[in-house]
Image: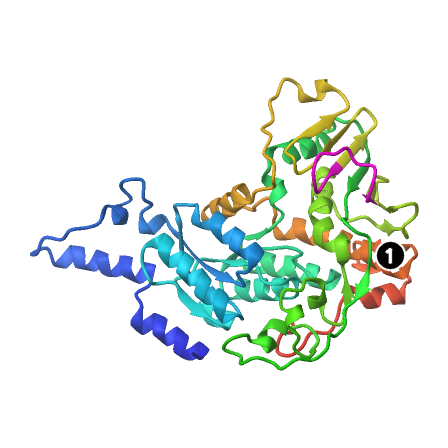
Amino acid sequence: MSRKSAALAVSEGQSTRRQFLRTSAAVTGSAIAAPTIIPSSALGLDGAVAPSERIVVGGIGIGRRGGYDLGCFLQQKDVQFVAVCDIKEKRRAAVKKQVDAHHSNDQCATYRDFRELLDRSDIDAVLIATGPNWHATAAMTAAKAGKDMYCEKPVTKNISQSLILANTMRRTGRVFQAGTQRRNLPHFAFACELARTGRLGKLKKVYAHPAGMQAMMSGWLVPEVEPDAELIDWNMYLGPAAWRPFNKKLLDGFNFEKGGGLVGGGVLEWGSHCVDLCQWAVDDCLPPVEYNAPKDGELVARYENGTELIFREKGWIPLGSCPVRFEGEDGWVEAGDSGKMVLSSPELLAGREVDEIGGYPATFHVRDFLDCVKSRRQPKGNAVAACNAHIACHAANIALHLGRQVKYDNVKHEFIDDEQANRLRSEALREPWRL
């Protein structure tokens, strides 16, 4: 179905939520002869949410991580999930089956081209859980279409894209939530609060776990027969990435999708969660201005005020995955995905009880996003916070790739007197996906 025919189907064959409400109001005022039985769900009774209070959501790229996110969205009573777009026919069918069963209807529409989904005027927000290659491009296209979005991470491919993303969300006024769900978990939030509010004294060091310090360049695999686009749309899967021949091993790949540019490895993928928390601990200030080559298993970056951001593989207290540690002149705190944290002194708790929620669930983060869609305030994983955290990851990855120190200017948004590093700030995108 073309974009035009899809839009026509919505306007002529399907009543949108807003059209339904307008029509209902007109009918109520003029036709009262026949008794009407209105379901309690339409009135917001029996624990249901009235249609006027529901957030209509569509999904773009719902695979393994997206399937988990979808479950978190469907748990929320004020979510009406109406459409899914994916380049794989099997995924489109599987998500439709899941959503239709949840809503007890057959109304979840399926699309192969995400622009057709964005053309629907009834959709308020989208869940973007494609591969990393698509995150920023899909998010900015959604913003220009007037949609709010929950976008999985890493949300950008490079420094330039990070800046464009933040500016696009500011200019369009859309609500953007990066999938850095640990910002909405109690023990991580408390640890960051201790650092931000001076309870640890002057902050000296913040530590992030990168889950592998390696920088690579993406390549090709042996060409295979490309499937029919209706089954697997390979061209759309590549999207803005540099073209390469089809190989089924790349379909569920991760880092290859960065196209011809520099691949982030653990520093950008898993590390962006930890760096995001470190950025929160330093009160979401601008990224570090100096990044050094790895030495003795650590990559040290420095903020303008002298605080160090240290990427460290080993030496962690066993508190689960994604550990972070914040050290000040008067104390320290370390936390991980177990839901637990260790403090230099129990007095730092100040009598507070902090809930231990392990396993880094996204439910609270999704709820934060939905509340912000309604209130229009900024969520915890907003575009500016995501931009600064990702710039820190990209710059560290460039230092890792070059094997030497680089210095970053947060005013000019470029590396100082470093042509080689500056060439890695961005990459060419395939037509028509230029930003």
Q: Quadrant of the N terminus?
A: bottom left
**Residue at 52% in and 60% down:** 62
Q: Is residue 120 visible?
A: no
Whether residue 313 appears in magenta in the rendering, the answer is yes
Residue 198, horizontal then vertical, whole percent: 74, 28
Residue for badge 1: 399
**Residue at 41% in and 62% down:** 96
Query: For mark 1, does the 10 Å Cα neighbourhood hold few (<14), some (14 to 19), or many (20 or more) residues?
Result: many
Residue 246 falls left or right of residue 204: left
Callout 1: helix, strand or loop? helix
**Residue at 57% in and 79% down:** 227
Q: Nearer the viewer, residue 294 or 18?
A: 294
Magenta residues (range): 311-324
- Identify which amino acid the numbered label 1 is placed on: Ala
Classify 368 as above or below 92: above
- The majority secondary structure of the magenta stretch comes to loop
Q: Quadrant of the C terminus?
A: bottom right
Residue 425: quadrant of the picture: bottom right
Whether residue 314 appears in magenta in the rendering, the answer is yes
